[in-house]
Image (cartoon, rainbow, N blue to C red):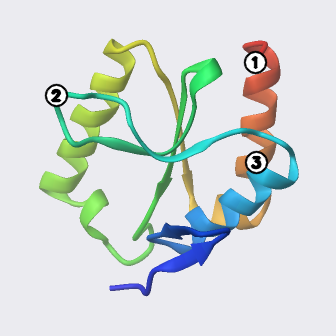
Amino acid sequence: MTAKLIVNGVTFDSEGEAVLSLQLAERGIQAIPQFRFDLNRKWRFDFAVKAGRLGIEIEGGTWVNGGHNRGTGYENNCRKYNSAIKHGWRVLRFTTDMVMSLEAIETIQEVLTKIEV
């Protein structure tokens, strides 16, 4: 298990989440970490931009066959993302590499511009 990381008083489960938190703040994007979008389930987005109903997920274990990209974990994520869509959310999914290369933050900015937040 990876050690928890604390950025600006908020605890993150992964390096990707911590780095994206800094990138969002640097660009003035108000994103809520660990936002619970479905009150009937314990599902949370890694980040949510409520004004644009945009959920942002950083997928872990991409190259190590982690729990979220195997069998049950993958299927449960499909249910989570489908539920988000049913509740009117858009969902962007990124890997840690995509965060580090700035692809994630650039995509988030582009999407937010197009949905006029």
Q: Earlier in the sequence, mark 1 or mark 2?
A: 2
Q: Nearer the viewer, mark 3 or mark 2?
A: 2
**Label 1 belongs to which residue?**
117
**Label 2 belongs to which residue?**
40
- The C terminus: image quadrant: top right
Left/right of residue 111 with respect to residue 3 in the rendered view: right
Per the rendering, the mark at residue 105 is 3
Q: Earlier in the sequence, mark 1 or mark 3?
A: 3
Which of the 4 image quadrants contains residue 61?
A: bottom left
Residue 84 percent coordinates (x, y): 36, 25
| Near-viewer residue (27 or 10) | 10
Q: Earlier in the sequence, mark 3 or mark 2?
A: 2
Three-letter code, disc 3: Ile
Secondary element type, mark 1: loop
| Near-viewer residue (25 or 63) | 25
| Near-viewer residue (51 or 101) | 51
